[in-house]
Amino acid sequence: MSTHGYETGRLDLPFVGISTFGKRPYVQDWDRIDAHAAVLGAPFDAGTQWRSGARFGPRAVREASTLFSFGHAGAYDHEDDRTYLPGDVRIVDIGDADIVHTDTEKSHANIETGVRSILKAGALPVVIGGDHSVNIPCIRAFDDQPPFHILQIDAHLDFVDERHGVRHGHGNPMRRAAEQAQVTGLTQVGIRNVSSTAREGYEDARRMGSDILSVRQARNLGPAGVASRLPTGARVYVTLDIDAFCPSIAPGTGTPSHGGFLYYEVLELLQTIARNHEVVGFDLVEVAPDYDPTGSTAILAAQVMLNFLGFIFDARCPG
């Protein structure tokens, strides 16, 4: 008889056990990653300019993701008539980068080490933030990789060069990304009228290779139209700020902005990107669970991440 008091084996229900992402295997040794995709937590929010709390995002998203752990043989979508993430797609959770409180550079360096370890293993890096500054070390980790384009889905441009002496906060990541030699350009989608970037920031972004679309412009174009704005054949890194969504469905974030996307608008864009481009990595940031007592924001984040992973590997191994 089992010491847990159950005779016929473990059910491993979502609310039981350790909350790895999607209840996938945990890999502690970053030199022994053997997977198609590896999830890294980046629980850092010292880059925030207003409401903190995104340091608890990775833990909340992981816990929410256990809701979707029933599909051991994959997830069947009756609309697409496809089974996503079948058992032969190996996804692991490598835990969190070590965060040193108040020390941005050391914390970012540890995040960068994690992403480099995933790339060295030949796996797809999937990073859960944390505030959007965690994108800075993620992109740096690709400095020995072939060039790629960045798709940012976000309410804010995040293209500030320096503010109050800060160059590596959550208002700076797209500016820092545009400076990297491996980044060929950016498509910034969902940017709207409460952006914290001044006019010169928009001018700098366009001068440095950005294509900027608001929510209304993206809706007019549709997912296929937005995707067509990306360079044909480009490898793509996706960075998704949860505040790209309308706060009516994603209130759990530090800088909510009304007028955002709804679920299917983002989902269909991600599906189109995965079909037309090689996705080389992605991060999802700015989930701050304490501002959403319902837990809906974390569930939304987990669902988007799992669906995007399904689209990516379906495109790589169609059939």
Image (cartoon, helix red, strand yellow):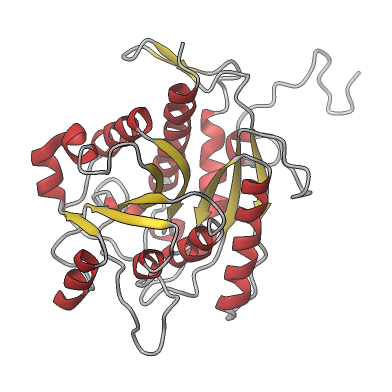
In this view, the residue farthest toward the bottom is 164
Q: Is 60 situated left or right of 176 in this image?
A: right
Q: Is 100 situated left or right of 126 in this image?
A: right
Residue at image x 26%, y 43%?
A: 230
Residue at image x 91%, y 18%?
A: 1
Q: Residue 16 at x, y = what percent?
A: 67, 34
Q: For residue 160, say whether it is visible.
A: yes
- Relative depth, front residue between 118 and 306: 118
Q: For residue 239, say whether it is visible.
A: no
Q: Residue 295 at x, y = what percent?
A: 43, 46
- Relative depth, front residue between 206 and 159: 206
- Relative depth, front residue between 115 and 26: 115
The image quadrant that residue 63 belongs to is: top right
Residue at image x 39%, y 54%?
A: 292
The image quadrant that residue 251 belongs to is: bottom left
Q: Is 9 situated left or right of 215 in this image?
A: right
> Does 55 sit above or below residue 297?
below
Tell me how many marks there are.
0
> Does 278 sit above or below residue 111?
above
Q: Residue 82 at x, y = what percent?
A: 41, 13
Residue at image x 52%, y 32%?
A: 67
> Does 302 sit above or below residue 56?
above
Q: Is 243 situated left or right of 77 in this image?
A: left
Q: Residue 239 at x, y = what percent?
A: 39, 52
